[in-house]
Image (cartoon, grey):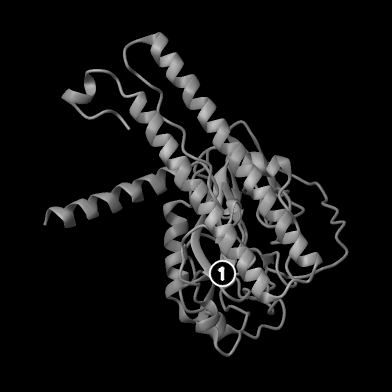
């Protein structure tokens, strides 16, 4: 019984750690599929329900057996000044990995995917914050100006002459965009994961059989809603057409299953920045300052190692593409990358544990647990 309790406690601790880390960085949540998601369907944006709502575009999600469409919807921003960075699928070299969307003070990287309605692959052109009020760009949003007066009109020029509905980054036929320095910086800022209304919206889409790609063939009957979960609202929009031909492989389930290391990071690019330590509080200001400097140095050092490994792995991927490497060589490279990534994380975890043990307040450790 003691062993079972210890295991349960360990899993609970890991769960809390994941939640904490995910609030600060975009995360790949461990979902990966062996074949690409369908093209993005063509649909109209419902009218904005009221001031303060921000458009979140629809996307294809995965339920373990099939892709399903999560309709685009208007969502009330969780904080003034926060924008939505859409979710996206990215080719990791062996599978398509899912990257969850998030709220933050700036829009980060979302794969270069052109979701429309302000999300044209880079940033967001649909509106801006002025203190605690959101102003809508009428040129890309469906706004009732008799009810919402904080609007402006800026025409967006799309220099991309190739119009497509591709829904993923990288791989065969995918968008080739890479994150800019500004997008990488935005990805390390404080974030908020999808709010409760978005999570409920996701679950309702998942349970709707008509939204499964194998049923609607890339043309969902509900493509966008005026509010989260309003699938039967009279203002909900059906897709006008599929974004392109969708033919999943015959052995869809076999292709979707990830290799034995499912859920574990394969590349350094899938790692989230480490959560920062809580400020030390030993009661000795000089000692606390010294500890804080040690923590900051370790954090910076580990982030640099993350970036160096990510750059090295990306360069190897580029060489494989240039050399038209065969599947066996690609698989060997993926296995090596996964080992490198996991070894790096294990070493970083050990370093963080060591520094926390060294910085444990004297005397307190014997009388009561140290603060995490």
User: For residue 324, which quarter of the picture?
Assistant: bottom right
* x and y percentages locating residue 17 in the rendered image: 38, 45
- Per the image, label 1 sits on a secondary structure element best described as loop
* x and y percentages locating residue 27 in the rendered image: 52, 52
Locate residue 181 relative to residue 31 in the image: left or right. right
Locate residue 199 relative to residue 89 in the image: left or right. left
Q: Residues within 10 Å of mark 1 (few under 14, many from 20)?
A: many
Taking the view exactly as shown, the residue that stands out farthest to the left is 1
Q: Nearer the viewer, residue 275 or 148?
A: 275
* x and y percentages locating residue 105 in the rendered image: 60, 38
Q: Quadrant of the C terminus?
A: top left
- Would you name the residue on which mark 1 appears? 236
Q: Note whether 284 is above or below 141 in the view shown.
A: above
Q: Note whether 172 is above or below 52 in the view shown.
A: below
Residue drawn at (77%, 66%), measured in percent from left and top?
Answer: 321
Q: Nearer the viewer, residue 36 or 348?
A: 348
Q: Note whether 31 is above or below 360 in the view shown.
A: below
Q: Nearer the viewer, residue 185 or 213?
A: 185
Determine if residue 118 is in view.
no
Residue drawn at (19%, 26%), measured in percent from left and top?
Answer: 368
Locate residue 67 relative to residue 263 in the image: left or right. right
Determine if residue 203 is in view.
yes
Q: Note whether 123 is above or below 129 in the view shown.
A: below
Taking the view exactly as shown, the residue that stands out farthest to the bottom is 250
Q: Quadrant of the N terminus?
A: bottom left
Residue drawn at (27%, 28%), measured in percent from left and top?
Answer: 370
Locate residue 204 relative to residue 143 in the image: left or right. left
């Amino acid at each position: 019984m003691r062993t079972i309790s210890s295991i349960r406690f360990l899993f609970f601790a890991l769960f809390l750690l994941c939640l904490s880390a995910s609030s600060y960085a975009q995360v790949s949540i461990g979902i990966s599929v062996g074949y690409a998601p369908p093209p993005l369907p063509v649909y109209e944006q419902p009218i904005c329900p009221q001031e303060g709502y921000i458009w979140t575009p629809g996307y294809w999600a995965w339920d373990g057996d099939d892709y399903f469409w999560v309709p685009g919807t208007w969502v009330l921003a969780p904080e003034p000044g926060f924008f939505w960075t859409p979710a996206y699928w990215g080719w990791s070299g062996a599978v398509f990995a899912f990257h969850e969307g998030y709220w933050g003070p700036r829009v980060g990287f979302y794969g270069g995917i052109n979701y429309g309605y302000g999300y044209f692959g880079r940033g967001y052109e649909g509106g801006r914050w002025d203190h605690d009020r959101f102003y809508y760009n009428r040129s890309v949003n469906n706004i009732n100006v008799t009810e919402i007066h904080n609007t402006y009109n800026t025409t967006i020029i799309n220099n991309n002459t190739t119009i497509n509905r591709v829904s993923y980054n990288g791989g065969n036929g995918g968008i080739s965009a890479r994150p800019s320095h500004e997008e990488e910086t935005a990805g390390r800022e404080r974030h908020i994961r999808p709010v409760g209304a978005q999570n409920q919206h996701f679950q309702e889409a998942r349970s709707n059989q008509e939204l499964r790609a194998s049923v609607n063939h890339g043309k969902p009957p509900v493509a966008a809603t005026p509010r989260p979960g309003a699938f039967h609202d009279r203002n909900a929009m059906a897709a006008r057409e599929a974004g392109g031909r969708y033919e999943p492989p015959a052995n869809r389930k076999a292709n979707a299953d990830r290799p034995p290391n499912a859920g574990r990071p394969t590349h350094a690019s899938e790692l989230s920045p480490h959560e920062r330590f809580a400020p030390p509080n030993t009661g000795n200001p000089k000692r606390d300052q010294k500890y804080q400097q040690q923590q900051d140095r370790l954090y910076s050092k580990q982030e640099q190692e993350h970036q160096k490994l990510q750059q090295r792995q990306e360069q190897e991927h580029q060489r494989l593409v240039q050399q038209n490497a065969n599947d066996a060589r690609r698989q060997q490279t993926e296995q090596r990358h996964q080992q490198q990534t996991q070894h790096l994380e294990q070493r970083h975890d050990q370093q963080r544990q060591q520094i926390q043990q060294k910085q444990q307040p004297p005397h307190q450790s014997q009388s009561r647990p140290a603060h995490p």
